[in-house]
Amino acid sequence: MTAHALVFVAPPDDKPAYREALLMLGRVALNRKLPPPDVLSGWESAQWIYPALDGELRQEAAATVAEMPVDWALVPVEGRRKKLLVADMDSTIINVECLDELADFAGIKAEIAAITERAMRGELEFEPALRERVAKLKGLGLDALQRTYDERVRLNPGAATFVKTMAKHGARCVLVSGGFTFFTERVATAAGFHANRANVLLDDGAALTGAVQEPILGRAAKLGALRSEAIALGISEADALAIGDGANDLDMIKAAGLGLAYRAKPLVAAEAHAQINYTSLETALFFQGYRREEFA
């Protein structure tokens, strides 16, 4: 059977959580007569290597940390460090949904955000929901795009370290968004991605026309991006890490060798290989076995 790593990550300022997770998960490991844990980052992350994975380990680990503010994963040791990163942008790499923030400049943020939330939860098909929201922005001046980026968009904690560390160690990093190229181009540069893919907002030179260029990059296209990038690199989907938070990320998350849900909607969290809910995006590096001193 394939060896697996059981790794946990605690918020760096929460030593009690680290101690408790180390103790409780240590008992799980001790029951299987494993050696002491391997510390990936002091007071932050540690792991145990299980030579063989039994059917009860995941459930036992999950039950052990259920009430703790820590993130954890049980991942195969073989091929653990991924050669391809495919990441969602809005509410994953950055702190906001750009379309919602654009709508704020049009005075209709609440209306647009309600549609966004339903689409993210998988209650609406992504493509028609995107067309509907963009149509409501017809006539919005193009200056709102730059203002949204300058005033609202921020990288989420750990985003640049996450991307730049994977790139430093040879992975190709691609930002794939159901949002818009105006933002992905800028965010990709800020975070250190090699490339970006997204939708194109149409304008007349002064304002938005209320349309988006077809075909729309949605759920199927995100999965297609992962597959095409893997083929171009000559690797398998198992060598990829995909991360996101909404329903349109789900197919690529499930297809990747390591699919992560970042503060995700319930539908996505339930299907991902692991979740990041309490810590930063640097946790995706610990899950791959990186040590703090290897971070970019």
Image: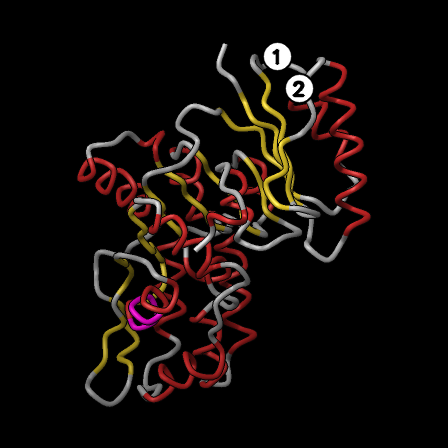
Q: Tag 1: residue type?
A: Asp
Badge 2 vs badge 1, beta-carbon distance below 8 Å: yes
Please tell me which residue lies in front, 267 or 162: 162
Residue at point 25% right, 57% down? Answer: 195
Res. 34 mark: none
Chief SS of the magenta region: helix
From what the image shows, is residue 296 above or below residue 251? below
How many numbered discs, if any?
2
Res. 57 mark: 2
From what the image shows, is residue 191 above or below residue 125? below
Q: Circle 1 is placed at which residue position?
A: 54
Q: Is residue 196 left or right of residue 103?
A: left
Q: Quadrant of the C terminus?
A: bottom left
Alpha carbons under labels 2 and 1: distance apart: 6 Å
Q: Tag 2: residue type?
A: Leu
What element does badge 2 sit on?
A: helix
Residue at point 45% right, 62% down? Answer: 90
Please tell me which residue lies in front, 2 or 262: 2
Q: Tell me if residue 183 is in the magenta stretch.
A: yes
Question: Hey, which quadrant is residue 202 in on the image?
Answer: bottom left
Rendering coords of residue 37 (x, y %): 67, 29
Rendering coords of residue 182 (x, y %): 30, 73
From what the image shows, is residue 128 above or below residue 108? above
Rendering coords of residue 86 (x, y %): 35, 47
Rendering coords of residue 139 (x, y %): 32, 86
**Span shown in magenta:** 182-186
Residue at point 63% right, 50% down? Answer: 277
Q: Counting other residues with Cα less than 10 Å from the Cα at mark 1, is it few (<14), some (14-19), or many (20 or more)?
A: few
